Amino acid sequence: MALTPEIAFDDLEDSSEAIETSQTYRIDFEKNRITNELISGLEAIRQFVYIALHTERYSYSVFSHDIGNELQEVLSDNETTDAYKKMEIPRLIEEALLYDDRISAVTDFEIEKQDDAFHVSFTVETDEGMLEIEEVMGEDV
């Protein structure tokens, strides 16, 4: 006679696919804090783009190695030409953003050098729609 009852449990594994949502908390970048407001859709994707463009890859252990960009290395290199930097910026931005499954393409790059910075504008094609992004990138990316 067993001391514990023999109970047969049904297999509770859910075979349906989990639906991933882009719902996340809004970050107030001016006050450097996470708010309690939930955002989703294009707004959440825009926030991801901002984070990816303003985070140096491998610098913060809180982020996976897929989050961030490697623009700092190229933009701060004084031995490379501005033409080379203009050529590399689109590739590095695409690498930073296409990691996200919600983003299907990064297109229509326009890059202008002004003083010590590059003014970059581009379009992000997502599952939710299109985003027009404009950023100023310099050695302090």
Image: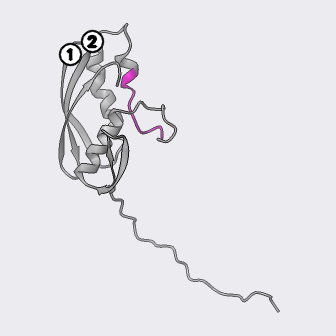
The residue at the point 27 percent across, 55 percent down is 40
The numbered mark at residue 129 is none
Q: Position of residue 2 (x, y in %)?
A: 80, 89
Question: Would you say the residues marked 2 and 1 are in contact, meaning their CB atoms lie under 8 Å apart?
Answer: yes
Above or below: residue 88 compared with residue 38: above
Label at residue 113:
1
Amino acid identity at mark 1: Lys
Compared across the picture, whether 130 is left or right of 93 comes to left
Give x and y (percent) for residue 117: 25, 18
Residue where numbered disc 2 is placed: 82
Q: Position of residue 28 (x, y in %)?
A: 31, 44
Q: Amino acid at mark 2?
A: Asp
Region of the chain picked out in magenta, as a range: 64-72
Placement of 5 over or under 53, stated as above or below: below
Secondary structure state at the residue bearing disc 1: strand
Q: Where 101 falls versus 7 (above or below)?
A: above
Which quadrant of the rendered structure holds the N terminus? Answer: bottom right
Mark 2 / mark 1, whichever is N-terminal: 2
Q: Mark 1, residues whose alpha carbon is within 10 Å: few (<14), some, or many (≥20)?
A: some
Apparent side of residue 25 relative to residue 117 in the rendered image (left or right): right
**Residue farthest bottom in this picture:** 1
